[in-house]
Image: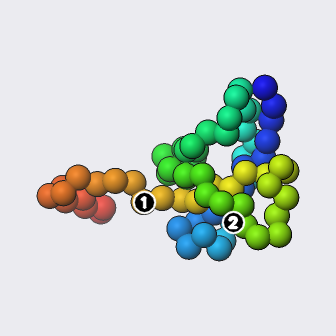
Amino acid sequence: MKAARAILFGLDRKVIVGAVRVVIAEEAPKIIMLDGEPYLAMPIPPGWDAKAVLAYGQEIPFRPAGVVEVAS
């Protein structure tokens, strides 16, 4: 078990929206949820040390066809 830093990128994969510390039992998690927003593992950006950090990109949650959502 070890701890690692995970950098969370926005939808455009360019802007860092946050960093979290994760504890890894065997392998890095495939998804991180932060404030109800899903972040999926992505390739490490060029020039970064892959052993020092994990990278996750924000994803748009799946919405079933025909569902209408309204924000007021």
Q: Residue at x 80, y 35 (%)?
A: 3
Task: Give the mark nearest the N terminus, 2 or 1.
Answer: 2
Q: Amino acid at mark 2?
A: Ile
User: On screen, 26 above or below 32?
Assistant: above
Report the Cα–Cα distance between label 2 and label 1: 16 Å
Q: Residue at x 53, y 68 (%)?
A: 11
Q: Amino acid at mark 1?
A: Ile
Q: Residues within 10 Å of mark 1 (few under 14, many from 20)?
A: few
Q: Quadrant of the N terminus?
A: top right
Q: Which residue is mark 2?
A: 16
Say if residue 13 shows up in the picture.
Answer: yes
User: On screen, 22 above or below 39?
Assistant: above
- Tag 2 secondary structure: strand
User: On screen, 31 above or below 64?
Assistant: above
Q: How is the image coloured?
A: rainbow
Quadrant position of residue 7: bottom right
Say if residue 17 shows up in the picture.
Answer: no
Q: Residues within 10 Å of mark 2 (few under 14, many from 20)?
A: some
Q: Nearer the viewer, residue 51 or 35?
A: 51
Q: Position of residue 47 (x, y in %)?
A: 83, 69
Tally of marks: 2
**Which label is found at residue 10?**
none
Q: Position of residue 8 (x, y in %)?
A: 66, 57
**Which label is found at residue 60?**
1
Q: Nearer the viewer, residue 13 or 20?
A: 13
Q: Quadrant of the C terminus?
A: bottom left
Q: Position of residue 36 (x, y in %)?
A: 48, 46
Q: Nearer the viewer, residue 71 or 19?
A: 19
